[in-house]
Image (cartoon, grey):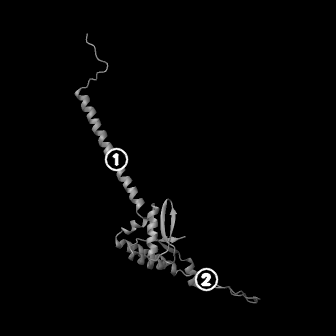
Amino acid sequence: MFERDPQAIVLSRQSILLVTAVSVGLLTLCYVLGVQVGKQSAALRESATRGSGEALQELPASIEDQLKALQGQELVKTEKIAPKMEVPKAPEVGKQDPKPEKKATKPASAEAKKDEPKWTLQLISTSDSDEAGRIAAKAKAVGFTTTTVKDKGNFKVRLVKSGPKADMDAAESKLKGQGFKTYPVKVE
């Protein structure tokens, strides 16, 4: 009688082709998934190393000019709103007010300045503290005092000086002349 070896594997041509096709399919799937994961991790690393303002710097100048124009229109709208003024009541006939009240009035321009939001400039937002330190030192070397704020794992280097948007626009042009990429930030 013919005895079979229990450890012998019998492979037919069809089973070899099936195993080869499945192997090629799995390798292709692993390759495609690896490429996708690599792209995602590169995109995440790139966004972490770039400052948040750098994305705005990549916009075409015409869109940037449009944004500045829109911001300027909003400021003009808030400046044109006149503060509410109280109309004094006319005294009733037959009754006299023994002591008329004197109310201190502030000039309208002082109230407008008080309500106007304060701005500062952010030089960089990065997760690398060494990079933030280098930018702060570079700004100090050209005469600007900065502060570094840690927010959500990022180090944000901003000017200490804050003021109206027009003042910050002037400082921004000086900083851009020194090679900085800045963007305005409202001070809370």
Nearer the N terminus, badge 1 or badge 2? Answer: 1
Q: Residue 135: horizontal and vertical position, in percent? A: 44, 69
Q: Residue at x 26, y 36 (%)?
A: 21
SS class, disc 2:
loop
| Side (left or right) of 147 relative to 59 | right
Q: Amino acid at mark 1?
A: Gly
Of residue 20 and residue 144, the one placed in the foreground of this image is 144
Task: Identify residue for label 2.
Answer: 85
Of residue 96 and residue 73, the one placed in the foreground of this image is 73
- Numbered mark located on residue 172 in the image: none
Q: Residue at x 39, y 68 (%)?
A: 56
From the viewer's perspective, is residue 47 above or below residue 15? below
Q: Quadrant of the C terminus?
A: bottom right
Q: Amino acid at mark 2?
A: Met
Label 1, label 2: how many angstroms apart (C-alpha)?
Answer: 68 Å
Task: Identify residue for label 1.
Answer: 34
